[in-house]
Image (cartoon, helix red, strand yellow):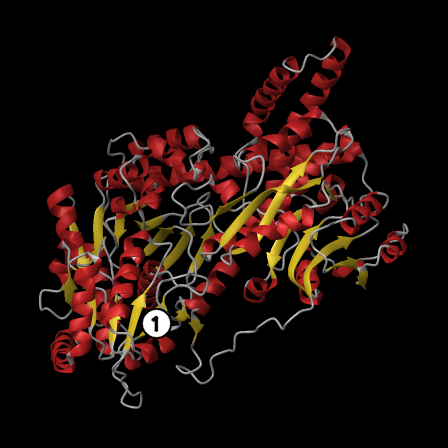
Amino acid sequence: MPQSATADLYNHAPSISRVAARDLLATVAIPVLNGMPLLAEVLAAVRNQIEVPEFEILIVDSGSTDGSLEVAANYGARIISIPKAEFNHGDTRNLLVREARGKYVCFLTQDATPASPRWLASMLKPMLSDARVVAVTGLHIARPTHNPFVKRDIESHFRGFGIEEGFLLHSQKDPKRLPEGLLTFFSDVNSALNKQYWTEHPYPRIDYCEDQLFGREVIKSGFYKAYSADGAVYHSHDYPLGDFLRRYFDEYRGLKKSLNYVDPVRPRNLLPQAFKGWFAELRYINGQRYTLPHALYWAHHAWWMSFYRRLGAILGGEHEDLPSALTQYLSLEKRASSISTGKALALLVLHFLRKFLRKSARGAQKAFHALSEQGPAAFIRKLVLFLRLGFNREPERINPSPHMKDRYLYNFVLDYDGKTNFTEQALPAGPLKINWLIPDFSVGSGGHMTIFRTIDALQRRGHRNTIYIMPPSQWLSSDDALRCIRQHFIECSGVELVLGLREIGDSDVCMATSWNTAYPLYRVQNTRKKIYFVQDHESEFFASGAEAMMAEQTYAMGYKCITAGEWLTHLMRTKYGLKSGAFELAYDHNIYTRKTNVPRRTDSIIYYARPPTPRRGFELGALALKLIYERLTDVEIGLFGWDCSKLDLPFPFTNYGILDHYLLSQLYSRATLGLVFSFTNYSLLPREMIACGLPVVDILGENTQHVYTNKEVVLAAPNPHAIADTVVDLMRDGGKREALTTQALRHNLSYTWENQFATVEKLIREL
């Protein structure tokens, strides 16, 4: 079994909390507020569960007055009461897990009735069968009396998992991944989780979509999630027709607040989209063989459902701009709403009129600014662009195929027609306004660390930087994203951050930082210069196919390239004919240095293990380490860079997880040998390891040969036996390790970030 070890690296490292031994296997947890009469049905079905003899029912009630508490007590539930004002979907579920006595916690809502006496056993089975599984979501079945469109939508959604019985495991690294919406799908209407996992990954403290964010975190953190077709519940909502608008308003308001998701439907295409949805429903009705009166009834019903769905999506996405009285009127909760329907309609018309006038004025202002600064041709070009697209407005998202994971990206791909649509202008002499288009990030991302370092340095040098995070992203707000950057990456003081690409401001330079952000950069016109910040040959991230082609196509867009290392510059120039210049990956000399107070071990190998990142060659390293352990049975193997605690590997190892820079320097100073693989460029980790006096083994390839010209890193052929031979040879020969370290340190000293940032600043102007 892997060990978790950081305390010996850093005396003040936080301890990892553990769940104490429990008498119970499971807790069934239910948040309740006036849940009758269905609550009684739910509790009766839970009490009738078989095959799981040790479980409890735990309820958090937030002010029921309909007899729910009495019914819950009759079924032996343990009850926790909280004020209604304190209820929050994320916090309340964290409270339920914290108070649960079971090793596993199964969530139900007060109107989700287990469909089988084996529901609980079926929800626990995936986690009991495989320790990598930390969360389970189960099938929903529409209640028989509810409207046919609700039933059809629920069946269609769960049919996407592709199984009718048993359970299905899925993770980030599965070769046959589900579409993104199903891969991360997790619904607390019917779910289960491992309490041990929850102690380190609690629910986010939000009012909506806490379960979807939890499911996304499970996948992103490298664990497994399961879908159980046998763990089914009866659950659906059949609102009165007049409440559908409120239902969709609340739904899309929650998506905007929690996931920053905005539906692509806009006022200008509301009716076409509503009719499109209605026609689809009419085809469905036609296939159901209804009598004529029933068909007409459901056709009328379908029109208003389709219209309200689109209107609710628009208004929910714009809820922050609506008058508070209108927001209260539109919410299904109807908090303190006192305005009439007529007044609500008037406020709605005024909202759309104000929005139209504001957008028209902004577009006209930018067009006339182009007239005064750049002449009539630029004015006409800006005006036409505004009329055709709206100024830098996001394209509407489409889904050409259910297998296309990132619908947002593919619209930008469709914008690229192989033609040059941009004329570069001279940069001003003073400080520059630089916009950075970046993909979403998570803690531990080395590529984002280099981006944020560069932004921070340019900001300190007087330039004004704005980061735009391309959707989809996990952040609830710009402040949340900036807080993460400052806590886990670098300060970036004074830097602005914007979620989404709806309003890309004017700039002197606009930077793409990945292949997918290169596509929206192609569309940007309100900048003087476009630059591609290239840290990897990203087309090699994918197997031959559409994504590889789309990534490679970005090198045909004619951008100037600033690359991480000379190998990429050589590649951009010789293979793609792009004007390019390089900076080198460096290291922080104040952190990464040989530490005389840390004794160097002679039996310790550390491996940069990133299972979800294919270009890091995790499987190759794991096979090599198996051979190494067979030949050096007293060696200590440590994995870092990812939480590998749940992996079942053929050798014992210490799991260090994701460490901060200080802890990394301690680890590098103590270990005997470092193992780092990188297939699509070179990595900055060897520089940091060398600075701490640690010999490094990397993979022999065109990229590493081009960079390590002074033999400061030992390169092994990319097969397990060659890697094992190289590592064993170095582990047995201390003199060879010392000679390698001395030579590597001599060449390593010149690499400082400030020197490299000066190079980046120079390249921005000179390319």
Q: Position of residue 683 (x, y in %)?
A: 25, 62
Mark 1 neighbour density, 10 Å: few (under 14) some (14–19) many (20 or more): many
- Which sits in the foreground, 241 or 81? 81
Question: What residue lies at 22% left-to-right and 59% top-to-bottom?
Answer: 720
Q: Is residue 618 left or right of residue 329?
A: left
Residue 743's quadrant in the figure? bottom left
Q: Position of residue 670 (x, y in %)?
A: 30, 81
Q: Amino acid at mark 1?
A: Gly
Q: Quadrant of the N terminus?
A: bottom left
Q: Is residue 518 left or right of residue 276?
A: left
**Residue that mark 1 sits on:** 638
Residue 697's quadrant in the figure? bottom left
- Which sits in the foreground, 399 or 320? 399
Question: What residue lies at 36% left-to-right and 34% top-to-bottom?
Answer: 382
Which secondary structure lies at badge 1?
strand
Q: Residue 308, can we see it? A: yes
Q: Residue 754, can we see it? A: no
- Which sits in the foreground, 5 or 301? 5
Rendered position, 447 above or below 588: above
Q: Position of residue 402 (x, y in %)?
A: 46, 32
Rendered position, 258 above or below 262: below
